[in-house]
Image: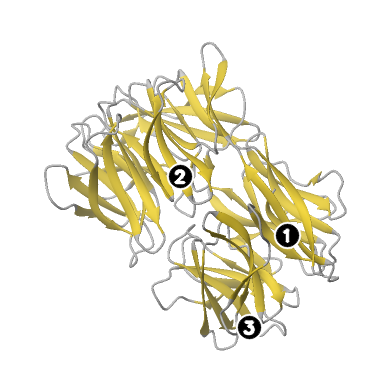
Amino acid sequence: MDDARISPDGHAIAFASPVAGTAQVFLMLTSGGEPLQLTNDEGDKIVTSFSRDGKEIYYVRSLGSDEVWAVPALGGVPRHVTFGYFAIPSADGDSIFYSKVERAGIFRATKSGLNEELIYAPKGDEHFFAPLQAFPGGHDLLAAGFASEGDFSMISFYKIDLTSHEAVDLGQVSGNLQDPEVVWAEPGKTVFVSRTVNGLTNIWKYSLIDRSLTQITFGTGPDFWPMPDPAGKGIYYVNGKSSGLLTTYHVHSKVSTDIAADDANQPAVSPDGKHLMYVTAPAPQKSELWVSDIDGGNKAKIATGVALGTTSWAPDSLHLAYFRSRAGEGAKGYIVGSDGSGLREIPVAAYDIWSMAWSPDQKMIYVAGTTSAVPLSTVWRWNLDGPNPEKFMDNCGGGIVTDADRSGRYLLWIVTNGAKTGIYDIPVSERKCVSLIPGVTTYGGRFAPDGKSLLYAAASRGEVTIYRQAWSEGKLIGAPRAALKVPFPFSLVSGGGNSYDFSTDLSTIVYARPSGHADLYLLNQK
């Protein structure tokens, strides 16, 4: 159960849960019973709120662009509302507040999605804002500011005046996980949050008046998504742990093998197709980077940290690049041998690192990430024999660099969401992105070993297809062809990172299978 939200009358809870690799919206009575599945289309769903009258559930569908949708709470046809995320209703229910991927700030539109207006633009270093709750009376909005998109380890609270559009700082809370799961405890005065302290995730109450924190639930947790009952019976919350598996599928034999547990994710297959790196999450705020054979054998732990991410293998299949993120300290990139030897830090001063790609001669590495001053992607290029990287480009929107062609003259660039969603190449001599396949939603992609085509995966209703697009000297040749139709669905992205990869000869696919167990609890306020 993810993104759980309680209805205004307290009789039902909406949440997201994976079905055949795609997160869908469900409704369940607070008294228990079987949940009702409300959506079944493509694109992962994130439940954000109920409408004020409880008749609809707002959710975000991620499929190239983050879109706010609404589905009838008792079942029916979903409707598209607007483009954005973190949607919540106004106090009177006549409008919604939301954020947008490509423009920092908080926006308001009618509940039909019309008459969009910017109601707050950031004035400081925090580039990402999300609406949380409407203050009683409807004249002010409680909002959260983050230093980086998707980094909820530190939340700054603000009270935004909807008339003057000015914001008052209400303090910070560290240790928040998942999403900005912030709800009123005492409307206008205190909020409930889920936060992790000393490795334990529990529900806490934060006072907007004196900025104090009080622990509400105790024990090993993890406790998520606090939901006060409107009738005053107590606080509902979700307790549970995900336990996703990483699975290797051999295309020719049609044999699948589970190779890793502990919420394993972010697989990256080596160029020779024989090795794999991936990240596990054995405990809250703990990640481990592992390297293994493609079938899971000969495992070796390479690194441990709060938040680790895989990026790419070097052309020799013996070295790899990864990054470590830590709240308030920025991200650090590293290169290391697959046996853990020769660790080197990449001297790039980024707040977030999103991807890295090696040059074919293995003498340079390209790093895509963000800085505190520029929230969209910047690309740096580092000569491994030199001291400092150079800024390569920063004019291609938000995206990731995934590969270099065998000549070293072109990079492959993927924009995963927003108006510029699609596949691009970057002529290294020109330092600009050139649109190749606009509108396609994928997460990852690479040049084929012969340098004559590029490969990418795309998901549609109930299936995943890997396409081959002929390419030469920065230009496409013909239309993309389906190179492999995978006989089962899986999500392309999970937890902010890729959830799959494939060998360049398309003989092997490695993908994450989210699973777990969650229970709904009611904490009696007595």
As displayed, is residue 431 above or below residue 483? below
Image spot of residue 265 (x, y percent): 50, 38
Q: Is residue 381 left or right of residue 446?
A: left
Write down the residue under mark 1: 5
The amino acid type found where label 1 is placed reads Arg
As displayed, is residue 174 above or below residue 348? below
Q: Which mark is residue 319?
A: none
- Front position among marks 2 and 3: 2
Write down the residue under mark 3: 140
Image spot of residue 263 (x, y percent): 55, 39
Q: How many marks?
A: 3
Mark 2: give few (<14), some (14-19) or many (20+) Cα within 10 Å.
Answer: many
> What secondary structure is marked by label 3?
strand
- Camera-side residue: 365 or 181? 181
Where residue 227 sits, quadrant-wise, is bottom right
Write down the residue under mark 2: 287
As displayed, is residue 497 above or below residue 490? below
Q: Is residue 222 left or right of residue 357?
A: right
Q: How far is the residue under mark 2 from the one under mark 1?
A: 28 Å
Image spot of residue 224 (x, y percent): 65, 56
Question: Does the image show residue 80?
Answer: no
